[in-house]
Image (cartoon, rainbow, N blue to C red):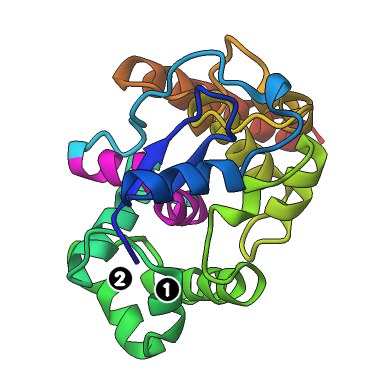
């Protein structure tokens, strides 16, 4: 798979991750993903580099690679957020690549792939089970989208349609799908009509509920505080039941 660059249309083309190619091919790519609802989907601001792993190299990969972003979101459970989103970079490095490729991971020997994630420092608290989930996700992307993870959202006509597609991904439940939808809309310029509504509370502006709202150490601390507050309330509610 070619080196990916994160490109956002400023001339009426749909925001997308496109392969680095010659000028003529790049124009054809941008025209091919043009969408009729583009006026409603135009980015409100220039996209910024993601700061989810709080590591420059890992965040750079997340910012330019659709699959890295999806895998990071998949890994984001039962471990600190930074650990989860550093995972894609760790996996790519151990595979000797500068990006993740769905077809390569899908075809990887399961035991060998699990060992990649188990190698110290481990990619996750439960590297074996998460290795299986990552491969399941990649196999689904190969079978349903030809191995192109960006195709999940490239031509989604509405936020509701995009949410349905995200929820169909292995390992993406309703909450994870809505958070990733919010991340796409808030930070990656993917904004089909109704995206914020489809993301639910995670699509609200000026909040600090999820990874979609993390832009640096300060907002990371606010999101972590919010999560701790929610856990405390849930625990208190359980005790009072």
User: Which residue is most to the front?
Assistant: 24
Instruction: Answer whether residue 59 is magenta in the image.
Output: yes
Q: In this view, does 152 lie above or below 131?
A: above
Report which quarter residue 193 is drawn in: top right
Residue at the spot x=40%, y=53% of the render? 68
Q: In this view, does 179 lie above or below 125?
A: above
Residue 70 in the image: state x and y as whole percent. 50, 53
> How crowded is the residue under tag 1: few (<14 C-alpha within 10 Å), some, or many (20+)?
many
Instruction: Answer whether residue 135 is magenta in the image.
Output: no
Instruction: Tell me the number on the disc at residue 117.
Output: 2
Residue at the spot x=56%, y=14% of the render? 44
Instruction: Tell me the SS state at disc 2.
Output: helix
Q: Distance between the residues labelled 2 and 1?
A: 7 Å
Q: Main secondary structure of the magenta part?
A: helix
The residue lying toward the viewer, choosing from 36 and 43, is 36
Residue 229 in the image: state x and y as whole percent. 56, 23
Magenta stretch: give its range: 57-75
Residue at the spot x=72%, y=25% of the render? 196
> How crowded is the residue under tag 2: few (<14 C-alpha within 10 Å), some, or many (20+)?
many
The residue lying toward the viewer, choosing from 134 and 209, is 134
């Amino acid at each position: 798979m070619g080196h990916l660059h994160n490109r956002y249309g400023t001339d009426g083309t749909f925001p997308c991750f496109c392969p680095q190619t010659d000028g003529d091919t790049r124009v054809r790519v941008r025209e091919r993903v043009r969408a009729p609802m583009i006026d409603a989907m135009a980015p409100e601001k220039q996209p910024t580099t993601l700061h989810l792993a709080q590591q420059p190299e890992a965040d750079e990969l997340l910012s330019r690679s659709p699959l890295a972003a999806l895998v990071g979101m998949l890994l984001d459970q039962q471990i600190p957020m930074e650990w989860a989103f550093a995972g894609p970079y760790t996996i790519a490095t151990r595979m000797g690549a500068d990006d993740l490729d769905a077809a390569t991971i899908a075809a990887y020997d399961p035991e060998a792939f699990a060992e990649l994630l188990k190698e110290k420092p481990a990619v996750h608290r439960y590297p074996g089970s998460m290795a299986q989930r990552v491969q399941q996700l990649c196999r689904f992307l190969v079978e349903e989208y030809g191995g192109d993870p960006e195709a999940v959202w490239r031509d989604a006509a509405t936020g509701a349609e995009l949410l349905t597609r995200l929820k169909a991904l292995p390992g993406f439940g309703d909450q994870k799908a809505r958070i990733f939808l919010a991340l796409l809309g808030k930070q990656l310029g993917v904004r089909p009509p109704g995206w914020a509504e489809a993301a639910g509370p995670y699509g609200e502006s000026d909040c600090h509920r999820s990874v979609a709202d993390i832009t640096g150490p300060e907002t990371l601390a606010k999101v972590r505080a919010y999560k701790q507050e929610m856990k405390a309330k849930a625990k208190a509610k359980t005790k009072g039941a």
